[in-house]
């Protein structure tokens, strides 16, 4: 909506995990390198964890692009709340297995054939599961068994599990000992540091068609970092709303007042947040004299 007003070719702060907008922070770079290395070198199990909105699905989409570019076959499960039967049906569908897809036995048979065929021609196959913290114990057990398929040269199926930190706790359960032992690579995504968060914003705006962005002054960028806690999805939501409000006000530069309004609309909480009276932000003097002063620090 505001793209023409600011001169963007595309929306800079879309909420979709689009690899073409990738910001390569050192940890994102490392995670992607690990995912690619893990699959290519047939390591078996790879686990990617991270708090909500830190970029796990984005990393998987980048991995997917890489696998497609290398013509490596893969199945990508983005819905992890599935039964065992649905799990095998989805694998069969993604890998285009010619078999009775509703039959687990037939899928396993066809999958085994495909994996051996691929391995014989020097190729590997991958299974990627997003939101893996939601997997049922039964499906996790099936995944563990799939991870057992191997030849003397390495694992036949490379399995990437991505999920929120609960995934780690799930894998710590006594029943999961065997699967846990097979995990050879782990990566974890943390929120961005302040300098990274600022670079992230600038990079996205540049990619969308505004080199040397002029909409967010330096102190406002720091404030966006503080309020978003360095979580990319929150940064996107804040910046998108800021741009929208500025457009509505025909303002080419964002201000703290607009940011306050955006954060109030988003019901955003952050450490040290100054409490607000309904419909009114306190001035500095009012705040110091209010009963809120000193709280939340
Ligand atoms: N390194 C990055 N470069 C560019 N955009 C990113 C990056 N990391 C995250 N984002 C953006 O942040 C938003 C959230 O990312 P993503 O959906 O990948 O997070 P997630 O960790 O999968 O979240 P959830 O736990 O809710 O599944 C998306 O809009 C995505 O484009
Ligand atoms: Mg995700």
Image (cartoon, rainbow, N blue to C red):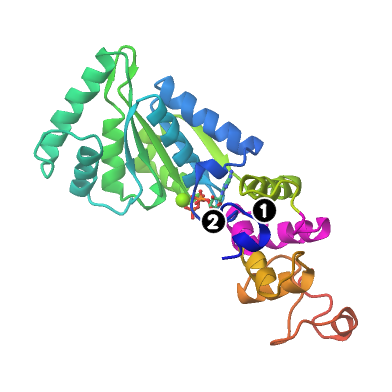
Residue range in magenta is 214-239
Task: Tell me which residue sits at (42%, 42%) in the image.
Answer: 171
**SS at circle 2:** loop
* Residue holding disc 2: 14
Tally the marks.
2
Is 20 above or below relative to 294? Answer: above
Magenta-drawn stretch contains 257? no
**Ligand 1 has an atom within 8 Å of the beta carbon of the residue at disc 2:** yes
* Residue holding disc 1: 230
Residue 184 vs residue 162, the one in the foreground: 162
From the top left corner, tell me how far across and down residue 14 is, in percent.
Answer: 54, 56
At label 1, counting other C-alpha atoms closer than 10 Å, the crowd grade (few under 14, some 14-19, many 20 or more) is many
At label 2, counting other C-alpha atoms closer than 10 Å, the crowd grade (few under 14, some 14-19, many 20 or more) is some
Task: Tell me which residue sits at (65%, 61%) in the image.
Answer: 239
Quarter of the image with the N terminus in it:
bottom right
Residue 246 vs residue 288, the one in the foreground: 246
From the top left corner, tell me how far across and down residue 33 is, in percent.
Answer: 54, 28
How far apart are the alpha carbons under marks 1 and 2?
Answer: 17 Å
Q: Main secondary structure of the magenta part?
A: helix
Q: Is residue 292 visible?
A: yes
**SS at circle 1:** loop
């Amino acid at each position: 909506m505001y793209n023409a007003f600011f001169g963007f070719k595309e929306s800079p702060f879309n909420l979709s995990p689009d690899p073409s907008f990738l910001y390569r922070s050192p940890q994102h770079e490392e995670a992607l390198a690990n995912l690619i290395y893990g699959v290519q070198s047939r390591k078996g199990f790879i686990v990617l964890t991270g708090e909500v909105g830190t970029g796990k699905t984005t990393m998987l989409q980048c991995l997917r692009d890489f696998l497609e570019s290398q013509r490596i076959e893969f199945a990508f499960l983005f819905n992890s709340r599935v039964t065992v039967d649905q799990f095998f049906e989805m694998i069969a569908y993604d890998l285009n297995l010619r078999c009775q897809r509703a039959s687990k036995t037939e899928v396993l048979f066809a999958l085994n054939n495909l994996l051996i065929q691929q391995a014989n021609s020097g190729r590997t196959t991958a299974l990627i599961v997003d939101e893996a913290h939601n997997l049922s114990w039964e499906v996790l057990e099936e995944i563990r068994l799939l991870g057992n398929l191997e030849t003397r040269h390495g694992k036949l199926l490379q399995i990437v599990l991505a999920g929120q930190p609960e995934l780690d706790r799930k894998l710590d359960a006594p029943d999961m000992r065997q699967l846990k032992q097979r995990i050879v690579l782990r990566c974890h995504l943390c929120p961005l540091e302040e300098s990274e968060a600022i670079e992230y914003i600038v990079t996205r705006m540049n990619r969308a068609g505004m080199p040397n962005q002029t909409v967010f002054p330096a102190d406002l960028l720091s404030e966006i970092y503080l309020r978003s806690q360095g979580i990319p999805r929150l940064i996107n939501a804040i910046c998108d709303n800021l741009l929208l409000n500025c457009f509505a006000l025909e303002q080419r530069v964002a201000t703290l007042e607009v940011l306050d309004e955006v954060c109030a609309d988003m019901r955003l909480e952050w450490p040290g947040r100054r409490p607000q009276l309904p419909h009114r932000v306190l001035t500095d003097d009012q705040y110091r004299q209010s009963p809120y002063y000193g709280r939340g620090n």
